[in-house]
Each structure stands twice: as C-alpha cells, then as structure tokens.
Amino acid sequence: YSPCTSQHHTALVKLANQYFTAKPNYDIAVPDIKACRFTGSEIRLRDDSIPLAHVAIAVEGAGWESADNIPLMVANTLIGAWDRSQGGGTNNASRLAQMAAQDNFAHSFQSFNTCYKDTGLWGVYYVSERHDVEDMLFIIQSEWMRICNSLTDGEVERAKNLLKTNMLLQLDGTTPVCEDIGRQMLCYGRRIPVHELEARINAVTAKDVQEVATKYIYDRCPAVAAVGPVEQLPEYNRIRSSMYWLRL
C-alpha cells in the first residue's frame, strides 16, 4: 500500500500510533447516543429589508451507511443546481432548472443531500424575488412528485454519469484525497475504493430511485426554513399537503 503523499508508509504509521492512539487519560465511558428523531416543522423570519427571499425545504434523508444513500444521491444529482448567471437556461438538462429559467422564478437553487450517522437531510435551497417564492416552491414540489411517480431511464443515466464525474473531480489532488480518506474513515470505518463506489452507482436503476424517493419524499413532513421577504411563502399545512399529489 502506498499513501497519497511522498512519505514512507512505515513512518506515517509510526507517527499515527504515537499521536493518535487512544490514551487512557480518563475513565468516562462513551455515552450511548440514541437515534435522532426527525420532526417536520418550519421556521420563518420575515424581513422585507432583505432584497431576496432565501428558502430551504427538506425531508429526512438516509444515514451514511444506509443502502438508500446512493439512490438518494442520484436523485439529488437529478434535481441539480442552477444560477441565472449560467448559460443554458431552458436548455439545461435539469427539468427544475428549465422551469426556473423559463419563468424567472428564481435567482438560483441548489439541491442538497446532507448525511449524518443515522439520519440526513435531503432537499432544495433557493433564492428568489418576493413575488416568486410560492411559484418556485410549487415547481420544486412538483418535480419531487414526478421523481416519485415517473422517471425515465435516460434521466437516471445522466444523473449517474454526472454524480460519478463530480465525485472524481473532488479527488483532484493529494489534499482532497487525504480529506476524503479521513471523512470516509469517520463515516464508514474504512476507505471505499473508487471502483466499488462506481459499481454501486452503476447498479442504481430508475425503479430504485422511484422507490427510494417514494419512501423518503412522498407524503412526508418537510422541514422548512425561510428568511427575507417571505410573505408569499404558503403556510405549513399547504406545503405539507403538496407532498402527496397524484397528478403530474
């Protein structure tokens, strides 16, 4: 095995044992932490002096070691991200980006998938004008319902290819590789080889994404956070009722 730097492996192991081996300097036992309980809720701070509204909506996601994590990552990539300063607009591969650009519903949006040990947050953060807050939320939830009910193989293949590309781009350099090793050791207890992660992504099908999206998104209580001129943001019960549409 060769480490990701020019240092000799034996020397690195010796230093790690010297400085990172657990030291018996206290007798306090590690607490038994129970699994977190996700509760759908909202927090909004209306401030009309802020020029743009900032809104985030998310559902409970999967933990690092969950088998559902990879399909959720594919779904997250499928939603994508967009900024009006980018070119493309209505020619963007992401359907949500096409709708946002066509009607100028948002300045930008970013889909996110944040994972923790036993839970996660899967959702979208967007920035829009005060009069477009409700319309942008509407098309986000519409796209979520579409993912739960009707996905094409082509869309999923595009998202899988983009996800693999983004992951490889994040490993460009020795410093990102070292950070990735440390992050995976903390999350998984081992380093997952790139070829193994690629195989897991390749194994995901459109049916897998729909099933996992239905499990985590459809008819689930979202968490909503908003700040700025958010008077047009629907009240929580209306947002919740838009999580189980059958129409597409």
Image (cartoon, grey):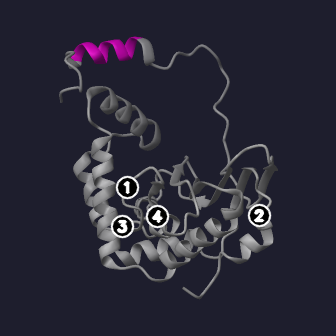
The secondary structure type at the circle numbered 2 is loop
The residue lying toward the viewer, choosing from 97 and 130, is 130
Q: Secondary structure at mark 3?
A: helix
Residue type at tag 4: Ala
Image quadrant occupied by the C terminus: bottom right
Secondary element at tag 4:
helix
Q: Label 2 is placed on what type of residue?
A: Gln
Q: Residues within 10 Å of mark 3 (few under 14, many from 20)?
A: few
Instruction: Give the residues drawn in magenta, as a range.
Output: 10-18
Q: Are marks 3 and 4 in contact (CB under 8 Å)?
A: no
Neighbour tally class for label 4: few under 14, some 14-19, many 20 plus, Cα within 10 Å: many
Instruction: Determine if the magenta segment contains residue 14.
Output: yes
**Quick one: SS at disc 1?**
loop
**How far apart, in angstroms, are the residues tagged by discs 3 and 1?**
9 Å
What amino acid does circle 3 point to?
A: Asn
- Asked if residue 235 lies left or right of residue 190, the reply is right
Q: Is residue 162 magenta?
A: no
Task: Name the one closer to the observer, 224 or 31.
Answer: 224
In the rendered image, residue 201, in percent from the top left (x then y), is placed at: 31, 61
Residue with the mark numbered 1:
87
Which tag is nearer the camera, tag 2 or tag 1?
Answer: 1
> Which residue is disc 3 drawn over?
91
Residue 84 visible (yes or no) = yes
The residue that mark 4 highlights is 97
